[in-house]
Image (cartoon, helix red, strand yellow):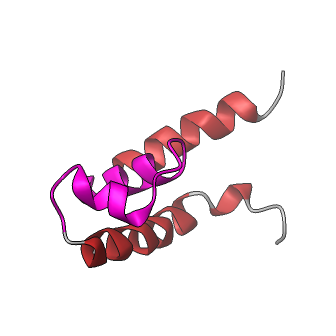
Amino acid sequence: MTAEPDLHRDLIAALAHLNPDDRLALHLHYPQDRSHAEIAALPDWPVGTAKTHLPRGKTGLRPLLAVWNLQT
């Protein structure tokens, strides 16, 4: 058995702890590879708001997924 199912489970759990707007921005950017403008258009945000939610979401995930950081 590989670690991938555990990582997936942990990622889903970590995403659930994020603000819904941060989670939406991450979901639209990473698996769907949307631009900031495309992300902003869906929930009708200004582009700057989308640019704010992406790093905030990543910052929120970092401590929740620290156990998966292979560089430490």
In the picture provided, is 22 more to the left or to the right than 66? left
Q: Position of residue 61 (x, y in %)?
A: 50, 62
The outermost residue toward the top is 1
Q: Residue at x 43, y 55 (%)?
A: 26
Work out whether 27 lies above or below 9: below
In the displayed structure, does residue 33 sit left or right of residue 20? right
**Does residue 15 appear in this view?**
yes
> What residue is drawn where x is 32% and y is 50%?
24
In this rendering, the answer to whether 17 lies above or below 72 is above
Q: How many marks?
A: 0
Tell me, yes or no, whether the highlighted magenta stretch contains residue 24: yes
Q: Horizontal and vertical percent for residue 35? A: 45, 60
In this view, the residue farthest toward the left is 44
* Vertical order, 11 against 58 (above or below): above
- Quarter of the image that includes the N terminus: top right
| Left or right placement of residue 55 versus residue 42 in this view | right
Residue 22, visible in the rendered structure? no
Dominant secondary structure (helix, strand or loop) of the stretch shown in magenta = helix
Magenta span contains residue 72: no
Q: Give the x, y percent position of residue 51.
A: 37, 74
Q: Nearer the viewer, residue 17 or 42?
A: 42
Looking at the image, residue 64 lies above or below residue 33: below
Name the image quarter holding residue 21: bottom left
Q: Residue, x 56% and y 67% (percent of image)?
A: 62
Give the magenta range.
Answer: 20-45
Left or right of residue 36: residue 62: right
Specify the quadrant that holds the C terminus: bottom right
